[in-house]
């Protein structure tokens, strides 16, 4: 299974061909327009399934399948956390729980970015399992911005997920420390001298055990399309053949 996240910086319909060249099975696109506005050119493949969520019709969170996988937003979804979507993924080689993430809520006085993820993983704690769980997207956070007096900073998010047996695949694959990443996923205002690592894929141990590759797009290849670079992750088949019985209620 190849899963990719890329903050497309809006107008995904005009840029889809570039990320689809990497042949994702599942694609998470922050800052994507509403599905009704996705008028792709005739030569761009259509997704086999899609889910979109957002208040702004031009700038929400899109989740797309280009394989047999199908999506269902879980009944326990809490719209207060913008935007962290608990999704039941089924009908592929592996059923699993996916949290699609675009952390951005300027209306929350507690914190606009990583605070959304912190609140969500506490609210959805019963869904965070040591098996068949993936959180992926634009977290808008990094340990370098930790505020010691704030409970919900990036490091506490990483620690809480680790307690559940869920880890960043990028940091596992490249043996990197949080806050010292050598592959930026954002170049602020598309300036090469302002690199940051803000996009993540956290996965449960069973996925980590079959992790095959992790790739981050380069500045040169993607600067014309977005300030973000894609994070591309490939997993092999899980050892266990039994499908997860996913509950859609908290």
Image: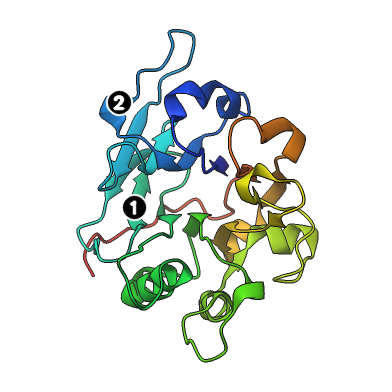
What is the crowding at mark 2: few (fewer than 14 residues within 10 Å), some, or many (at least 20)? few
**Number of on-image labels:** 2
Task: State the image quarter where residue 68 is shown.
Answer: top left
Q: Which numbered marker is on residue 229?
A: none
Q: Disc 1 or disc 2, which is closer to the eye? A: 2
Vertical arrangement, residue 168 with respect to residue 32, above or below = below
Residue 24 image position (x, y, % from top left): 55, 33
Residue 162 image position (x, y, % from top left): 57, 76
Vertical arrangement, residue 151 with respect to residue 143, above or below = below
Looking at this view, name the residue that lies furthest to the bottom. Answer: 149
**Tell me, what colour scheme is on the image?**
rainbow
Left or right, 101 with respect to 71, comes to right
Mark sitting earlier along the chain (1/2): 2
Residue 142 image position (x, y, % from top left): 61, 68
Query: Mark 2 and mark 1 in contact (Cβ < 8 Å)?
Result: no
Q: Quadrant of the C terminus?
A: bottom left
Q: Which numbered marker is on residue 37?
A: 2
Residue 140 image position (x, y, % from top left): 52, 61
Q: Residue at x 24, y 59 (%)?
A: 248
In this orientation, does residue 111 appear? yes
Q: Residue at x 51, y 34 (%)?
A: 25
The residue pinned by badge 1 equals: 87
Q: Real-space Cα distance between discs 1 and 2?
A: 22 Å
Left or right, 132 with respect to 198, comes to left
Looking at this view, name the residue that lies furthest to the top. Answer: 42
Query: 33 or 68: nearer the eye?
Result: 33
Query: 88 or 191: nearer the eye?
Result: 191
């Amino acid at each position: 299974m190849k899963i990719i996240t890329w903050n497309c910086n809006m107008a995904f319909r005009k840029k889809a061909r570039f990320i689809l060249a990497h042949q994702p099975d599942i694609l998470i696109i922050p800052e994507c327009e509403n599905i009704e506005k996705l008028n792709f050119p005739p030569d761009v493949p259509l997704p086999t399934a899609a889910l979109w969520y957002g208040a702004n019709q031009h700038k929400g969170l899109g989740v797309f399948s280009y394989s047999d996988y199908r999506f269902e937003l879980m009944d326990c979804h809490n719209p207060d956390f913008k935007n962290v979507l608990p999704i039941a993924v089924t009908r592929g080689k592996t059923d699993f729980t996916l949290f699609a993430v675009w952390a951005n809520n300027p209306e929350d006085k507690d914190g606009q970015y990583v605070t959304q993820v912190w609140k969500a993983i506490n609210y959805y704690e019963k869904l965070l399992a040591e098996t068949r769980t993936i959180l992926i997207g634009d977290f808008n956070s990094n340990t370098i911005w930790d505020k010691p007096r704030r409970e919900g900073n990036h490091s506490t998010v990483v620690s809480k997920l680790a307690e559940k047996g869920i880890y960043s695949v990028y940091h596992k694959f490249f043996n990197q420390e949080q806050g010292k990443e050598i592959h930026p996923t954002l170049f602020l205002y598309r300036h090469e001298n302002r690199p940051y690592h803000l996009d993540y894929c956290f996965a449960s141990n069973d996925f980590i055990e079959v992790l095959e590759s992790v790739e981050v797009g380069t500045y040169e290849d993607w600067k014309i399309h977005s300030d973000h670079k894609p994070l591309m992750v490939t997993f092999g088949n899980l050892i266990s053949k039994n499908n997860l019985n996913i509950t859609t209620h908290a």
